[in-house]
Image (spheres, rainbow, N blue to C red):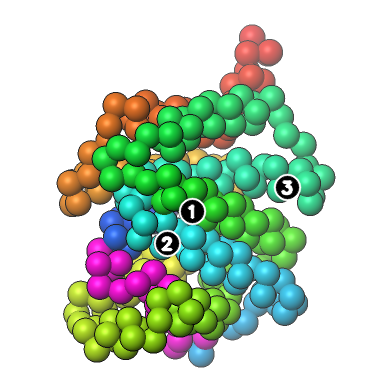
Amino acid sequence: MAPKDLLLALVVIVVWGLNFVVIKVGLHDMPPMLLGALRFTLAAIPAVFFIRRPAVPLRWMLAYGLTISFGQFAFLFSAMNQGMPAGLASLVLQSQAFFTLFFAAMFLGERIRAANLLGLVMAAAGLFLIGSQGERGTTLTGFLLTIGAASMWAMGNIVTRKVGKVNLVGLVVWGSLIPPLPFLAMSWFLEGPELIATSLRQFGWNSFLVLAYLAFGATILGYGLWSRLLSRYPAGQVAPFSLLVPVIGLSSSALLLGEALGPLQMAGALLVMLGLLVNVFGGWLFGRLRLA
């Protein structure tokens, strides 16, 4: 990978890793469903007036917007509002890789290889350690909601594969038109009009900067650079960079939010990361061992 593109990949990883700290800060001022509605409204408007709509049938655009955008972040924002630490959220969310494997096998007929199963077992053991201990601010509800977010991300990945090769930035921007209404409906019923009104009256620079980061940084800039890398290099060369997101998420949450992992959480985090590494590189490693 060219040095310039390597730098762009690292920019994406840092932006996406810090995303979890920003979400935690945003939830101090806004309830989760309202935060989601405003985030995707800002991600879609005014960008839809400048970015061409991808050639995607409406049913697949709806499926994309309701899974990877609405479903994922409704669960994730709720999880972090229910006590899921930002750093652990960035790690547990990566379990989407294993949900994607199973959904791809179910709906696309793809094979699950031995390296995938080994990585899954290791990551599952790590997730069990993380989810079984309510220490350091972690709650079982927050953990389960984060797993729900990972499954929605994985469903969105399957939708993206069904859509085929399209402009990823266009898909993200136009797909962002779909979540605001479901988010607003859930905010109205779960959070109530009084809390919505209070949050909007108290809307200040802190809330604006949070939304700007989530909409323009994590969404448009992040996916824009990521799609550029995917257009220049094989997916297998680009995708492993996403393994660095939890590293940034865990370190930035410790530095900026004072979050610290307990012993079992640390052991679980290491197992999850090791499982993800085996999932990504295990097939190559097993192939090399057979050739040796």
> What residue is pinned by disc 1?
145
**Which is more foreground, mark 2 or mark 3?**
2
* Residue positioned 58% across, 75% down in the render: 175
Is there a contact, CB below 8 Å, between mark 1 and mark 2?
Answer: yes
Mark 3: which amino acid? Ala
Mark 3: few/some/many CA within 10 Å (<14, 14-19, 20+): some
Is there a contact, CB below 8 Å, between mark 2 and mark 3?
Answer: no
> What residue is pinned by disc 3?
104
Q: What element carries label 1?
A: helix
Tell me if I can see residue 199 in this picture.
Answer: yes
The CA span between labels 1 and 2 is: 7 Å
Is there a contact, CB below 8 Å, between mark 3 and mark 1?
Answer: no
Q: Does residue 209 appear to the left or right of 102 in the view shown?
A: left
Mark 2: which amino acid? Ser
The CA span between labels 3 and 1 is: 22 Å
Q: Decide which of tag 2 and tag 3 comes sooner along the chain.
A: 2
Q: Does residue 230 appear to the left or right of 47 in the view shown?
A: right
> What residue is pinned by disc 2?
78
Mark 2: few/some/many CA within 10 Å (<14, 14-19, 20+): many
Q: Give the answer, above or below, for where 218 lies relative to 12.
A: below
User: Magenta stretch?
Assistant: 25-48
